[in-house]
Amino acid sequence: MGQLWIKNGLFVTMEEDKPAFRGHMVIADDRITYIGETAPNPAPEGAEQLDGSKLAFMPGLVNTHGHAAMSLLRGYSDDQNLQVWLEQKMWPMEAKYVDADTKAGSLLAIAEMLKSGTTAFVDMYDRMDQVAEAVKQAGIRGLLTRGVIGLCPPEVQEAKLAEAIRFAKDWNGEADGRIRTMISPHAPYTCPPDYIERFVQAAHDLDLPLHTHMSETLAEVEQNVKEYGARPVEHLDKLGFFSRPSLVAHAVHLNDEEIALLADRGVAVSHNPVSNLKLASGVARVPELLRAGVTVSLGTDSAASNNNLDLFKEVKFAALLHKGVTGDPTVVPAAEALRMGTVYGAKSIWQDDSIGVLRAGMKADFIAVDIDQPHYYPLTDIVSHLVYSGSGRDVAHVWVDGRQVVKNGECVYLDEERIRYDAQASFERLLRA
Amino acid sequence: MGQLWIKNGLFVTMEEDKPAFRGHMVIADDRITYIGETAPNPAPEGAEQLDGSKLAFMPGLVNTHGHAAMSLLRGYSDDQNLQVWLEQKMWPMEAKYVDADTKAGSLLAIAEMLKSGTTAFVDMYDRMDQVAEAVKQAGIRGLLTRGVIGLCPPEVQEAKLAEAIRFAKDWNGEADGRIRTMISPHAPYTCPPDYIERFVQAAHDLDLPLHTHMSETLAEVEQNVKEYGARPVEHLDKLGFFSRPSLVAHAVHLNDEEIALLADRGVAVSHNPVSNLKLASGVARVPELLRAGVTVSLGTDSAASNNNLDLFKEVKFAALLHKGVTGDPTVVPAAEALRMGTVYGAKSIWQDDSIGVLRAGMKADFIAVDIDQPHYYPLTDIVSHLVYSGSGRDVAHVWVDGRQVVKNGECVYLDEERIRYDAQASFERLLRA
């Protein structure tokens, strides 16, 4: 892929205690080979040059929880009680999905994520081969997993688990290593304990991480206590879940002991502030989680409960919401919120050795933000501006694995007009079917 | 100005119970003369034609509380306690402002507001002639008022009140009627009671509305009770404030009696969700205010506590925040949040007879949103998409008073490059001064 030399850019590296600086960055093939205030010496010969003077460069955002294909259901049901939303709206439509719908929805979601600066995402759904194909085509990075609901007869449970394992084996390391896989029982309230244990065993056998929904609503926590005599964190811990590298989504309703246990077990939490607000699930105890040393990253959840996939928005909500709710304007400062979207995201998916920070030797997953706009002026604190004032709509260019996947706001490897058309056609077919 | 015929657009009129429709709209001079599903008959001869097929049209947003010139302090102080933010950061910088700074900050803010779809805004600050000049130039609509802090010797109080009256007289009705004025004591905690009464008298004399900050923090409510033996709503009511048309900003800390009194007196509330979160002031009781029949609109407050002026963001926060905080996902549904940003905004500034709804006979203050993007697909519920998925960055064109003031995302009557340059220069001068 050759070399790229970015000159005179404003770099937000996300390195600990390193302020933003104006300087240079060089990419060779899939890696950052140089970043610094002075020009690379010797100058990289034959490198393509990019004038960075009106752009801010930062690591690509990492979306650590979602269901891409549900983008087809964006705006199909809002402002409803959770049970109405889920049982009367989502499930009946999802039951009608065929492979082409999952592909159409996934491509729509990936196009939106890439254009708004997300370079890696976690996806838990079914028909995951379709999602993986979409990832391969688009050039994004994906941590993919077949999420399994276990409220079904034993033979169906068996088949679903087998499919989850087959998918995880088939796709781990594919697309030049951009795809990795996990094992995912959907949630403690949708999978019996012995069934969850089989997922834990599969994760051990395949040496893969685990992902699940946990403690999203107060009702499911209460149900867990009633059925199993333990709150979800203790319950999952007893089932051996946290003996594997684990990422749990939501974690809204936690007590102090649960926070301590998550910290002790090294469990990563995907905080989904917008989805939790929209479905009225509540507000996660993010300041306490961070204080306890838990790795907290950010997820959009699906476009059916968000309703967009712009992770800049989650960063903004994470920075603002907890101040207002706790009454303390110093919690989750701008830099911490941006870390949640980048370096903590990379850590949550066990890839902080290669992405999440702009540093020589790291993978070249990064974005360029157009800061030549009034809402970035005056140019005081660029981290503050990206968090409090910026938006995914400001992203001009995106690179993943050293390859430019968004150029001047358009996806390089996707036919966006076709994607919009297919998404509309799929939705209308689902409505009629 | 002639005529404009928009063909085949998706219209979100904000008329009560009227769903979005595809159709036509005709503008003649400063007014909407036709809007409907079928083409105008007879066709407007010689009208400029605009293909609306990839755009959604809606009333321009109304920002009902802010301090435009403080955009120069964007990102200058974040994540601080209110007193540090105000006393150590804001006030010392504001004390160094000269006319040129107020002008530069106002132009920066107005450019940002116009580009993100705001067509009318309330501004309370000092050096208001500069703000008014900026409004005149940019083509936006402004309800402007000199906000007065009364913690000063009597002769200074006298001069400030005189200046507030002089400004209100000089500018009311200027810029083809786009500028109107109000009278504004800054807040009950910064103005002694007898001084507030003089503003009320002035508002009566000039037949103008009143605007003030009220009950933004719990501390100021408690201080009011301690000093004056009444909470702010009762206090202002006793001073005659609500005998005039009144708009109060924030209103975060209200009890049931106060909500009932605001409803009874017809007081409009400017809800500033992002500023209230960022400064950790709390979460206003918006569902209760709406239920009581209070007109609740949306304000950004200044870019120093927000940190941008994109009112689409306030609409989104209004729709999401109160669901999560109350635990009820049905409160502040999408359409209600969008009304808060448009028709309730117009009502809050006493201009709902002319703006806030797309209807024949109304002023042509409207915006066109580029919906040919993945986050607007599938095209299910356009109101949901505008609220939950959209952003001010999606605004392509803006008209105020029938005149196009933003075209393809750029301000028609402003030199944006110059504005960015001047804002940066002003900020750096303030830092050094």
Image: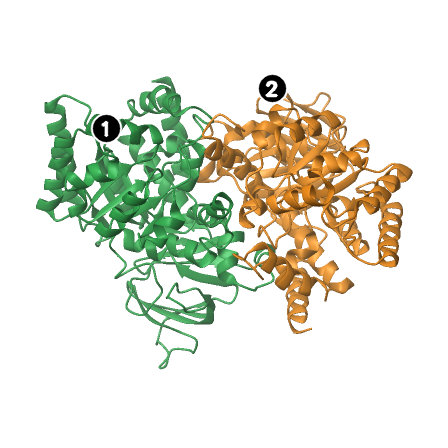
Chain colours: A orange, B green
The residue at 68%/38% (across/down) is A231
Residue A265 got which mark? none
The quarter holding residue A248 reads top right
Label 1: which secondary element: loop
Placement of A10 over or under A392, stated as above or below:
above
Q: Residue A17 — which label?
A: 2
How packed is label 2: few (under 14 Cα within 10 Å), some, or many (20 or more)? Answer: few
> Is residue A29 visible to us here?
no
Report crowding for label 1: few under 14, some 14 to 19, many 20 or more residues within 10 A (C-alpha). some
Q: Which residue is drawn at 79% across and 56% down?
A: A130
Query: Is B135 placed left or right of B373 in the picture?
Result: left
Q: In this view, does B26 lie above or below B334?
A: below
Chain bearing tag 1 is: B
Farthest-out residue, bottom: B42
Q: Write down the residue under mark 1.
A: B190
- Judge from the rendering whether residue A420 lies leftward or rightward of residue B369; answer left or right: right
Judge whether residue A352 can be spotted in this image: yes
Of B295 and B155, nearer the camera is B295
Residue A21 falls in which quadrant of the image? top right
Task: Name the residue type under label 2.
Answer: Asp
Of A391 and A407, the residue lying toward us: A391
When the figure is inspected, residue B37 is found, relative to residue B312, above or below; the finding is: below
The type of residue carrying mark 1 is Thr
